[in-house]
Image (tube, helix red, strand yellow):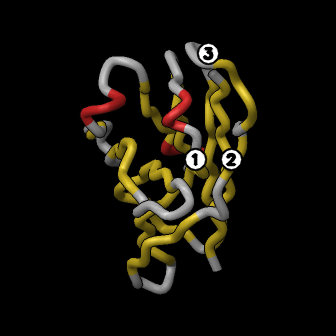
């Protein structure tokens, strides 16, 4: 079993900052890509940022220059530093991890999500 748990969401004013954390645990051999997605009710889940085990990052155009993704491979943890938040970025933010399990199988695991609310 593998668990993915996010933390760090909350309420912030427009222009403010939040830092999200996501830790994976369980029967993990290694993790390739870890990423952050967000979803507003009635909309599709969209990629915010992702990072490989080697540190290669990918960002949605809308967050480039404001958000920074990083990870600690030893802790199987990924972070998302969000600066300059906008009200339209209010959403549930989900973490995922592409895990190579100890049984040799690869699977994408998702966390339960953390709410980020940006007030205007």
Per the model, the C-alpha gap separating discs 2 and 1 is 6 Å
Q: Are marks 3 and 2 in contact (CB under 8 Å)?
A: no
Numbered badge on residue 115? 2
The numbered dot on residue 83 is none
Q: Residue 29: x, y in percent?
A: 48, 68
User: Could you tell me which secondary element the residue under label 3 belongs to?
Assistant: loop
Determine the image quadrant of residue 59. top left
Label 2 crowd bin: few (<14), some (14–19), many (20+), radius 10 Å: some
At x 60%, y 51%, the residue is: 92
Specify which label sits upstream in the sequence, 3 or 2.
3
Q: Is residue 74 left or right of residue 3?
A: left
Identify the element where label 1 is drawn: strand
Up/down of 115 relative to 97, above or below? above
**Horizontally, is 61 left or right of 70 in the view?**
left
Q: Using residue 87 as the reference point, say whether residue 43 is left or right of it.
A: left
Q: At which x and y percent is residue 12? A: 70, 24
Label 1 close to label 3 by CB (< 8 Å): no
Q: How many marks?
A: 3
Reply above or below: 12 against 1: above
Quadrant placement of the N terminus: bottom right
- Characterize the local packing of mark 3: few (<14), some (14-19) or many (20 or more) Cα atoms within 10 angstroms: some
User: Is residue 2 depicted above or below 111 in this figure?
Assistant: below
Residue 63 horizontal/vertical position (percent): 36, 29
Looking at the image, which is closer to me, 61 or 3? 61
For label 1, the residue is 91
- Real-space Cα separation, disc 1 to disc 3, in angstroms: 15 Å
Q: Earlier in the sequence, mark 1 or mark 3?
A: 3
Which residue is depicted at the point 49% across and 60% down? 96
Q: Is residue 89 left or right of residue 48?
A: right
């Amino acid at each position: 079993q593998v668990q993915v748990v996010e933390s760090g969401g909350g309420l912030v004013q427009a222009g403010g900052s939040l830092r999200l954390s996501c830790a994976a645990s369980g029967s993990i051999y290694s993790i390739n890509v870890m990423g952050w997605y967000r979803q507003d009710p009635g909309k599709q889940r969209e990629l915010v940022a992702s990072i490989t085990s080697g540190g290669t990052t990918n960002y949605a155009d809308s967050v480039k220059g404001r958000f920074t993704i990083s990870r600690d491979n030893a802790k199987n943890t990924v972070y998302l530093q969000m600066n300059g938040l906008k009200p339209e970025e209010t959403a549930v933010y989900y973490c995922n991890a592409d895990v190579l399990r100890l049984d040799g199988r690869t699977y994408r695991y998702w966390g339960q999500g953390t709410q980020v609310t940006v007030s205007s």
